[in-house]
Amino acid sequence: MRPSPRSRWRTCSSGSMARTRIETRARARALQALYAWDMRGGTNLERVASQVWDDLAITPEERRVAGPIVRHVAQKQRDLDAELVEVTTNWRLERIGAVERCVLRMAAAELAIGETPPRVVIQEAITLAERFGSAQSARFVNGVLDALARRMGRM
């Protein structure tokens, strides 16, 4: 009897699945920090993130993943916002809901960092928009991020 051909589908080990869950939770923590920062009128983002994460008692692994995203937004907010404005036709960034704006900034930062595949970034952002916003939020975020990823040459 011949062995079965190797499957094209990737298998997930428990280690890679745990890492994925940590990354998903870390993105939610980054979003919570960005939202708190947005609601406070744009004070020091890294300080706000630290306070929020202390209150939420997030794990060191989550901080390790969320930290670079938040730092990138803190350092490059104007550039990220300018990129988003280019793809949000007929929408000024300040008119977009706070949840959606924060999800877009977070995903734009991850796309700019370039360590995560763009489809993963977009899917995670859609999930967060749906979880913290609405189904309409998710559709809006999907359209904007697809256009942004193409504009950045990531897709």
Image (tube, rainbow, N blue to C red):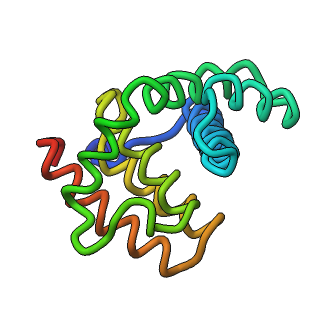
Q: Residue at x 32, y 70 (%)?
A: 91
Can residue 1 be seen by looking at this rendering? Answer: no
Q: Residue at x 85, y 37 (%)?
A: 56
Is residue 49 shown above or below 101? above
Number of marks in the rendered image: 0
* Image-based side of 81 in relation to 103, left or right: left
Question: Who is closer to the viewer here, 121 or 99?
Answer: 99
Is residue 5 shown above or below 91? above
Q: Residue at x 58, y 39 (%)?
A: 42
Residue 40 image-quadrant placement: top right
Is residue 89 shown above or below 81? below
Q: Position of residue 75 (x, y in %)?
A: 42, 23
Residue 141 image-quadrant placement: bottom left
Question: Who is closer to the viewer here, 59 or 6?
Answer: 59
Q: Position of residue 77 (x, y in %)?
A: 40, 35
Is residue 60 shown above or below 94? above
Q: Position of residue 114 (x, y in %)?
A: 29, 30
Can residue 90 be seen by looking at this rendering? Answer: yes
* Image-based side of 47 in relation to 102, left or right: right
Q: Position of residue 57 (x, y in %)?
A: 86, 30
* Image-based side of 149 in relation to 67, left or right: left
